[in-house]
Amino acid sequence: MSIQNLDVRDFRRALSQFPTGVTVITTNDEQGRPVGVTASSFNSVSVEPPLILWSIDKGAHSLAAFENSQHFAVNVLSRDQVDLSNRFASRGEDKFKDVIYHKGVGNSPLLNDYSAQFECKTWAVYEGGDHLILVGEVLGYRYNDSNLPLVFARGSYSVSSQHPSTVKYDAKDESGEFISDYLLYMLRESYNRFSSDLYPKLQAEGGVNPEEWRILAMLRDQGVMKTEDLAPLVMQPAVALMQTVEWMQDRGLVELVDGSLKLLPEGISLANRLLDLAKQHEAEVLTALSEEQSSQLKNGLRAIMESRS
């Protein structure tokens, strides 16, 4: 698409195809109060010297604190810290209330739970259009291999996992009892095989990505929903959900009134078509099982999920 007539929403949609990690950047304001903001713009710059960078919106309430601070810390979040990411991405609340942390270099808050942490001295601050780019010199770091990192892609939270092409599962291979009979491997392999067939069909039929499909499906079942209730169910932070909603409004699929979202006739029609397609796909997947086996499989998975809720 030509940049001369830039469609901001479409440009953001293109950028969202690039997955990133999720971080909470922390520092202190002039009064010494802790400040934190969720950011996915974190990146490495140099090893010698060790430099990293991230960027902050010039409209952020915490802009002055980060622009003027001599130190900041990067807390790379783990897959179990979605709520923490949402908290520090929001406005108008005490973000550090009930959050366990301690002070690091320059008294920057360090979260007690993390995938990785980098304590930094501000190296430089650069203009970057509607953002400021902050470069930090890493003075200390640590990481936790046991915590899988939280991932953000296409406006939705995700988790990192090994690519299916690197793992060849053979149900007939009895040489390795662990691989051939381990539930987690079988669940993941089943999901990878069959979701890779479904999502292209949803795109071809309705021009929607998986995140938009989840919104359509939830609204079809629930009718009208508050965006604050919908966001965690579709695994999108509030800001990203609103960007997705704007895109869907432009297509005439949904209507947002006083914070509540509902499907328009075109959205209902599309949701029904996609549901029929998904059910057909499910039926094809389950042809390997009898009706009784299918029922047992679903009931068993429900029991597992309820035991972990």
Image (cartoon, rainbow, N blue to C red):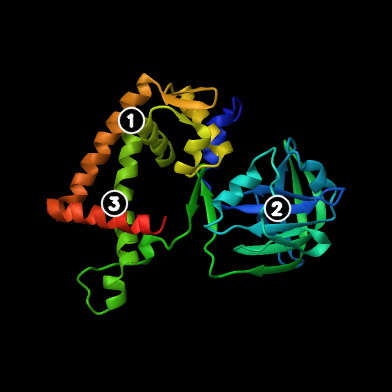
Q: Is residue 212 toward the left or the right of residue 113 in the image? A: left
What residue is drawn where x is 31% and y is 57%?
Answer: 303
Q: Earlier in the sequence, mark 1 or mark 3?
A: 3
Q: Is residue 292 toward the left or the right of residue 190 in the image? A: left
| Label 3: few (<14), some (14–19) or many (≥20) C-alpha neighbours in 10 Å | some
Residues tagged 2 and 1 counted as in contact (Cβ below 8 A): no
Q: Secondary structure at mark 3?
A: helix
Residue 253 appears at what percent x and percent y? 41, 24
Q: Earlier in the sequence, mark 2 or mark 1?
A: 2
Answer with the quarter of the image where residue 276 lies. top left
Q: Of the numbered discs in the image, which one, if any, rests on residue 25?
A: 2
| Label 2: few (<14), some (14–19) or many (≥20) C-alpha neighbours in 10 Å | many
Q: Which residue is mark 1?
A: 271
Q: Amino acid at mark 3?
A: Phe
Is 71 rendered above or below residue 48? above
User: In 3D space, how far apart are the residues under numbered discs 2 and 1 (Cα atoms)?
Assistant: 38 Å
What residue is drawn where x is 56% and y is 55%?
Answer: 81
User: In 3D space, how far apart are the residues under numbered discs 3 and 2 (Cα atoms)?
Assistant: 37 Å
Q: Of the numbered discs in the image, which one, if any, rests on residue 194?
A: 3
Residues tagged 1 and 3 counted as in contact (Cβ below 8 A): no
Residue 162 appears at what percent x and percent y? 43, 63
Q: How many marks?
A: 3
Q: Secondary structure at mark 1?
A: helix
Q: Amino acid at mark 2?
A: Ile
Q: Amino acid at mark 1?
A: Ala
Is 172 rendered above or below residue 93? below
| Label 1: few (<14), some (14–19) or many (≥20) C-alpha neighbours in 10 Å | many
What residue is drawn where x is 23% and y is 45%?
Answer: 282
Is 38 rendered above or below residue 74? above
Q: Nearer the viewer, residue 96 or 137?
A: 96
Q: Residue furthest bottom?
A: 175
